[in-house]
Amino acid sequence: MSLTDTAIRKAKDPGKLTDGGGLYLLITAAGGKWWRLDYRRPVTGKRNTLSLGTYPETSLADARAKREEAKKLLKDGIDPGQQRKAEKLAGVERAANSFEVVAREWLDKQSWVPGYLVKVTAWFEKDVFPWIGARPVADLTAPEFLAVVQRVEQRGAIESAHRILQNCGQVLCYALRHRTGSV
C-alpha cells in the first residue's frame, strides 16, 4: 500500500514504512525519518541502498520523483549510487578549478614588487571574485569578463579596468598551461 503524508507524520515507532518500487521511509529510534531506495546494481546484481533525503525536508512527492529518476538510470544500465558519486567528484574537481582558485595560484607565482602584488590582489578581490570567482574557469565566457570590466569602467577607473582585463587573460593563459582539464 502506498504511503500518505498523514501516515508519515503520525509514524513514531522505529522501522520501515514502504511505499513500493523499493522506496521506503526508515524511522530511527531517535525519531529521524530517512528516505531509502533499495535496488539491484545493473552490473553485479547485488542489492544496494540509496539515500534520498530526510523527511520532512524531502517530501513524499520529492522522494517518489527521486525514485523514478533512479529507476530511469537503472533502466539505462546506470547504477544511481555510482552516478551520484561521479557527480559529486566532478563537482569537487570543478570547484578546484574555479577562477578564484586558479587566480590565487597564479598570483602566488608572480615575482612582482610587493606593492603591485597587493594592488592586483585587491583588484581581484574587489572587482572580479565577487562576480566570477566561484565559477569554473572552463565555463567562463568573454561577456562575463566584459561585464566585470564594465562595472569598473562605470566607476571611472578606466586604467584599472584595462589592467584587470589584462590580468584575467593572464590567469586564463595560466590555466591553459598549468591546469590541464580546467579550460
Image: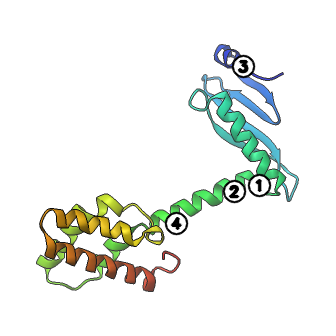
Crowdedness near tag 1: few (<14), some (14–19) or many (≥20) residues, C-alpha within 10 Å: some
Q: Which residue carries the number 3 mark?
A: 4
Quarter the N terminus occupies: top right
The reply to whether discs 1 and 4 touch (Cβ–Cβ < 8 Å) is no
| Label of residue 93 in the image | 4
Work out whether residue 165 can be spotted: yes
Which of the two discs, 1 and 4, labels the residue nearer the N terminus?
A: 1
Mark 2 — residue?
A: 83
Mark 3 neighbour class, 10 Å CA radius: few under 14, some 14 to 19, many 20 or more: few
Q: CA distance from mark 1 to mark 4?
A: 21 Å
Location of residue 134 in the rendering, given as x and y in whole percent from the top left corner:
39, 60
Secondary element at tag 4: helix
Please state which of the two labelled residues, at mark 2 or mark 3, is closer to the viewer.
3
Q: Which is nearer the N-term, disc 4 or disc 3?
A: 3
Q: Nearer the viewer, mark 4 or mark 3?
A: 3
Q: Residue at x 42, y 63 (%)?
A: 135
Residue at 49% x, 75% y is 182
Q: Is residue 11 left or right of residue 151?
A: right
Q: Nearer the viewer, residue 30 or 45?
A: 45
Q: In the image shown, does 8 or 14 lie closer to the viewer?
A: 8
Of labels 2 and 4, earlier in sequence is 2
